Each structure stands twice: as C-alpha cells, then as structure tokens.
Image: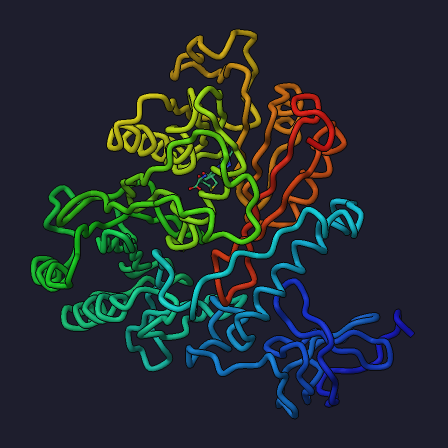
Amino acid sequence: MEDKILFKKGDKLDTDITDMGINGEGIGKADGYTLFIKDAVIGDRVRVSIMKAKKGYAYAHLDEVLIPSKDRVTPACPVARSCGGCQLQALSYPSQLKFKHDKVRNDLIRIGGFDEGFVDSVMQDIVGMDGAPVRYRGKSQFPVGRDREGNIVTGFYAGHSHNIIPIDDCVIGAGEYAEITKIIRDHMRRYDIAPYDEASGTGLVRHILIRKGYKTGEIMVCLVLNRGRAANKDMYLTGQEELLNALASVKDMTSVSVNLNTDRGNVILGDETDTLWGREVIRDIIEPVADADLQNMEDSSSGAAEHRAITYSISPKSFYQVNPAQTDRLYSLALEYAHLTGTETVWDLYCGIGTISLFLAAGAAHVYGVEIVPEAVRDAKNNASLNGIDNASFYTGKAEDIELSDAPASSPASDEQSDRILLPPPDVIVIDPPRKGCDEALLSTILKASPSRIVYVSCDPATLARDLKILCEGGYELRKVIPVDMFPHSIHVETVALLINPNAYGKGD
Ligand code: SAH
C-alpha cells in the first residue's frame, strides 16, 4: 500500500490531522498513505484537495476545516496563512511549545541515536515566552516591490516564493515598523523612486532593514539600494533630506543608513554601508535573569560568576539574536551551564559580535572568541571596550581551523593577524554554530582539547543531535538539553545542551 500512488491531482477527501511535520504542516493518513497539509493543525478534521501525489505520500491543499482542533486558534495576523514568516500561528502557544519540544526530542532519538528514556531524563521543559508572544522581534527585513497594479508595496515573501505579501503591520515585529515602512513607501511614490525588480535587476530600493533595541528603545533603519557608493552622502535618493527628516521624526530613531547591493542574488545585504543620519549603530542590553525565572534549573548556586548586564553595539550587518527577551534567558542558560568560578579559560566559537563571550567574561579568567565575519569581530572588540571588559580576545577565522596550543592558559593566544588561530587549553567550550552545525574538524579539535564542559547552543536540533552523537562517542556525557523558544509562531527552535567530561568530574558527578 505504502509505495503506491493512491491519488491524483485534484482529488478531494476528508482526513483527520494526527501529527505535524517538521515544517509545521499537518499530517493526515488515508489508507496508510500520508498526506502533508500546510496550515492544518493537529487535531483538525479537514477537507483537502490533492496537489502533488507521490509513491506513499502526497501534498494536499487545505480547502476547509470541518471540525477545528481544540489547539486551533485564530491567528493574530490577518495574512498569517499566506506569509512565509510564521508557520504555526493557527496553533495555540502551548501547543507550539509542545511541537518544538517534541522536535528536539525526536531528533535526539532518531538522529542522535540516544535512548528514549535517557533523552527524557536529560531534557528540561522548553523555555517559552511569558504571555502572548507578539511584538517580540528586534529585527525585520522587508522586501520592496510592486503589486499587480504597479503600486509600491512592502511586506514579506509568501512561503517558498518571492511574491511579496503586502504587510503594513507585522504582529511579531515592533509597532514602529508600520510607520517607518509607510514613510518610505510614500516617499518613493512622491518622487517616483522605483523598487528593485529581481527579474530585470533594475530599480533602486531592494529591502528595508529595521532593528529595534528593546531595552534601549533605539531604532535603526537601513535601506538596501541597488547601486554603488555615492560620491556625496546626500545623493543616494531623490528628496533625500525630506525622507531623512520624516524618518528622524519617528520616536527613538537613532540611525538611518543605506546598504549598497548590486548583486543579482538573494543575499539581502551588500558589503558597503553608508550612515546618512544619526549614529552608525544602535545599542541594546542583555541582562542575566535570576535562576528562578528558568524552569528546572539545577546548579542555582553555580560558581562565583558575576552576573551583570552587557551593552552591545549593533551595526546593520551584525548577527544579533532577534528575540531580546528570550536572549536574556538563552545566554543565562549558557552562563549557568558553563558553571564558571573565575579561573576558567573559555572558548566561545561562532561568537558573532561577542555576545556570549562578553556575557561569560565576568565569570571567567579569559574568553577567546572566534568568528568568521571580520565586521562582527570588530564589533566584538568594540563591545568589549564599551563594557570595560579586558579579559576577552577575538579572532577572525573559521572555528574548524582552530589549533590547540600546548602553552598554559596564562600565555597569550596567537597574534590576531596571523592565519593560525592557536588557543590555550580550555576548561569550557561554548559553541553556537549556524544551522549546518559544526564541521567535523572542529569536533575533533574539541575532543582533543578535552574541556571539562561543553555548552552547545544550537538553532537546528537535527545538526545538534548529529554533533552530540559524535561528542558522546568521543567520551562526553550529555547532561542537559533545554529548548528555548526564540521564534514564537515559526517552526524554529533554539536549544542549549550541556556535555561534561567524565574524566574531569567523575561519572555521575
Ligand atoms: N554566538 C553569537 C552568534 C551566533 S550565530 C550570538 O549568539 O550572537 C553564528 C555565527 O557563526 C555567525 O556570526 C556566523 O557569522 C558565524 N560563523 C559561521 N560559520 C562559521 C565558521 N565556520 N567559523 C566561525 N564562525 C562562523
């Protein structure tokens, strides 16, 4: 039965949604045949039409919800279904959290090869947001284009396409987004400034990047333009002064810049940025949260680490977590799991603008941050001085190219200009890689460096599970895994895992 094609395009049928797939789609069965149905929610009874049938499974369109699931809610956003940004808005928040918790659990079992009972013993409850998770995002990038009638629109891409769904107000973004995007659309209309057209590569305005520092209130706007650097800063846009005055009148506006990108590809930001008004950067603050705010934390007396808030300067191109409230919790967990006492040498790999490094520095002897993007390393160094931190060093390079030095921790690391990144033996390693996870060469370096603790911060549970398997086969013990919901309404989930070296602590310590 399973390997047959049971249906053809256009067939209609009713089914119960009994599960949810990794992309947030509902899963129903028909005679053992699996149906993947976008926008259907676990517990729904739905009427669908087949879109694409394969051997054993088909993709179907949700035509009608016949009996809604008890976990189904009305999305806060009117375009939740067509916009590609949020996949789970029709699912109640507690069910979203369960979906994410199960995703991490299943990956640890299926991909990590860990025993089910063991996974349940190390997994902590997912850390969700308090209250309704709206207006949480500190960064959004709105594509600019035209609708069918030729009107200028800003919004988000529909799922798996580059069709712009016009959105005036994004409910997960800052309230100021609507005002800012309207000012820019109105200005483009008034002065006949063309949006970028992907097909022809013509037109000027590609994207509007907006960031807000939630703790400071500071707002940054960066217009991504399809052009090179202007000889004179006043000459990027027609009527530029008028636009800058209008943007400057938005409460808490701190920085207005243009980023220049003439590349035909999908990468949003180009290499060069020119600040037109205000500061080059905005600032935001990340504060440790008391242990009591986190669920099921042990080690509440952890180390002698000094807990302090850190201020970060963020430029348009820097990576900075998009959910500031949950970042406080995420980094507090990393700090908790690192269990610092003030004497440790710490490696923070994939360190970005030094966010985690600086958060840990007060509790450690020295933190060594490694990051591939030179601008981020520059920001990390600035952020260290901004916070008066002198026991953190930052290196540009690939985490997989790090070499372990034989020198004791007190000796300085390799010079920052050299191609080699030679780091002293670590007591704690923190890793926070992008979705593809760690390179195998790095995992071997970590095993060779043999720190007492490894804190793995991950934005993809599948690659986390793969890498944990390798680290555990190399002798580490997985002690804790805690998912953190950084991206409510989306399918994405962040996870912090703690591994310990049994030789450093003794088994079961
Ligand atoms: N820890 C930081 C950044 C995490 S995002 C924070 O929480 O803010 C992952 C970072 O890894 C990005 O800054 C990216 O530029 C960097 N990166 C990607 N591949 C890398 C590699 N091979 N080696 C080092 N850094 C890398």
Q: Residue furthest bottom?
A: 66
Relative to 89, 438 lies left or right: right
Asked if 288 appears above or below 326 in the picture, the reply is: above
Give the quadrant of residue 33: bottom right
Relative to 105, 429 lies left or right: left
| Residue drawn where x is 46% and y is 62% of the image | 129
Return the residue nearer the eye: 194 or 178: 178
Asked if 460 appears above or below 385 in the picture, the reply is: below
Give the quadrant of residue 67: bottom right
Q: Quadrant of the N terminus?
A: bottom right
Residue 107 x %, y %: 70, 52
| Residue drawn where x is 39% and y is 67% of the image | 172
| Residue drawn where x is 57% and y is 57% of the image | 126
Relative to 223, 366 lies left or right: right
Q: Quadrant of the C terminus?
A: top right
Q: Residue furthest right?
A: 1
Return the residue nearer the eye: 145 or 506: 506
| Residue drawn where x is 23% and y is 46% of the image | 282
Q: Residue furthest front?
A: 301
Give the total number of marks visible in the rendering.
0
Residue 394 x %, y %: 39, 25
**Applied colour scheme:** rainbow
Asked if 45 appears above or below 168 in the picture, the reply is: below
Asked if 42 appears above or below 288 in the picture, the reply is: below
Residue 332 x %, y %: 45, 43
Residue 190 x %, y %: 14, 72
